[in-house]
Image (tube, coloured by chain):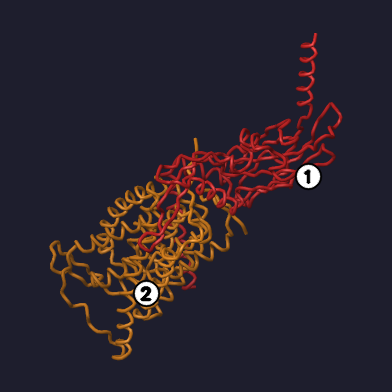
Chain colours: A red, B orange
Amino acid sequence: MRWVLALCLLLLLSTLARSEEVVLGLSDNQVSIDTSFTGSQILIFGAVKRETPIRTDSPLHVVITVQGPKQRVTVRRKSRWFGIWINTDAVVADAAPSFYAVATTAPLDEVLTQTEDLRRKISINRAIRSVGAPDTIKDASNFTDAIIRIRQNEKLYQEMEGSVKLDQQTLFRTAISMPSDLTEGEYLVRIFLTRDGEIVSNYDAAIDVRKVGLERWLFALSREQPAIYGLMALVIAIAAGWGASAAFRKLRNW
Amino acid sequence: MQIYLPIAEVSVNAFLILGLGGMVGLLSGMFGIGGGFLMTPLLFFIGIPPAVAVATGANQIVASSFSGVMTHFHKRTVDLKMGCVLLAGGLIGVAVGMVIFNYLKSLGQVDLLVQLFYVVFLGTVGILMFAESINAYRKSRRIGANPPARRRQRNWVHVWPFKMRFRTSGLYISAIPPMLVGFAVGVLAAIMGVGGGFIMVPAMIYILGMPTKVVVGTSLFQIIFVAAFTTLLHAITNYTVDVVLAVLLLLGGVIGAQFGTQVAVRLKAEVLRVLLAGLVVMVCGKLALDLLIEPRELYSLATAEKD
């Protein structure tokens, strides 16, 4: 009898733990890169659905990440060699996202434990899978730091602590701005609800970033028919050169 | 007006690019250079990825050279025969240069090589030309209008076999030196993403002894083909030619080149050489400083698509 009760309690607890769920909205689920593309702002908003009253013992937090396609990145370091600065060391990070933004309701170390971060790869540091450094390089972490530093300067990596607004523990929203030099592909949006640093619920969605129209056509042509693309570039160049010279001669004789 | 470039994958101001093309085109028309040695570093500077800048620069050079050479054809200042001999060497040079370029890219040293090439070649050529042209300019002012007759000297270019007569240039020399000059310039063109005019022009004047008036048109003539070949190779092997960027650059470039040719006709040859030499030395100095001064960011990233 006692163990039946224990099981019931356990079931109840687990349903309690699952009782908060995310209902999500995105301002766009597709970003189109056309000729006039100058970057994009994505509005991510949603609500926490629950069947039980709001727990008051610890506050609810929301963590939102947006992650671009992963790439292999070679990081090179310069050092002085006979008076000039040249690339001497290289480390390959085998999967670094081309874009990564993490937005939270409060500082990241308050809303998330180290273990959860490690498991779900949420903070920028964890999102980059490093690195097969050769034995000659002792300070591989400097190379990972360099990726983060350089990409943060280019606004490709963003850490926005406290930028998620959470109203009455139920409605949340944030805006993520994406720079103009985006890589094409599927961008993964992840939303985590946490209490006491533990993840109580999560939800995934995707944003499709695609070149469209002329951009799409030119890009595809350059990859699939490079010879024709190259010839087209030359024809345009020669036509422009000829046209300008002919036009100017007419203008002068006129 | 912002425009997104499909291959470079960055967004740029269209008017900035037009202006850049125009400025380089002006110099191109004036000096008979493709202008690549200015264009490529300038494109880096506004944030175009280096590989795209090199390849697209070559495409733009085709347009501005073509526009310039048309004008020279009408003035009959192109030595077609000499151009073809130079070109034969040039195309072989481009193919060889491309192999070297892609090998060094895999080692991660291509930036260094390109910069070293720029510094060494621009430095040597610029300083030599500057000294010589200042001398020539002084002499021409002291004596009056008549420049010294220095074309009748005989040196090794007259002694080697396979002699050919180049009527437009008024030369009777071996075909081997022009071939070698063409080859060297071709290698440089592929590695540095330039037409190689800044090497070609002095080589034609000082090694081959061609008259300055013919040099510009002939140099432009052979640059068209070398740059076209470079563009094609980059498009096929590296997918780095950005047509949208090229169109913007060359719209500015062809117009600039037309004005440049007009300016060149009105200036004295010695003055033209002093100006070109000064420009070459300046660009070289800037690049040398970049190598010598500790860079603000020691690390650089190169990405490859993950499949």
Between B276 and B259, the one lying in front of the other is B276
Q: Is residue B100 above or below residue A21?
A: below
Q: Position of residue B28 (x, y in %)?
A: 42, 68
Q: Quadrant of residue B164?
A: bottom left
Q: Quadrant of residue B218?
A: bottom left
Residue drawn at 59 percent across, 44 percent down: A99
Q: Quadrant of the N terminus of chain A?
A: top right
Residue drawn at 49 percent across, 44 percent down: A73
User: Label 2 sits on what residue type?
Assistant: Ala
Between A66 and B198, the one lying in front of the other is A66
Between B267 and B242, the one lying in front of the other is B242
| Secondary structure found at label 1 | strand
Residue A165's disc number: 1
Q: Is residue A131 above or below residue B12?
A: above
Q: Position of residue A51 (x, y in %)?
A: 84, 26
**Image check: A118 left or right of B91?**
right
User: Label 1 sits on what residue type?
Assistant: Lys
Q: Chain of mark 2?
A: B
* Residue farthest toward the top in the current orientation of the protein: A1
**Image check: A157 left or right of A229?**
right
Around disc 1, counting alpha carbons within 10 Å, would you say few (fewer than 14), some (14 to 19), or many (20 or more)? some
Instruction: Determine if residue A126 is in view.
Output: yes
Residue drawn at 31 percent across, 56 percent down: B187
Residue B277's disc number: 2
Residue A75's disc number: none
Between B255 and B307, the one lying in front of the other is B307
Q: Position of residue A236 (x, y in %)?
A: 46, 54
| Secondary structure found at label 2 | helix
**Image check: A237 left or right of B98?**
right
Q: Is residue B65 above or below residue B128?
A: above
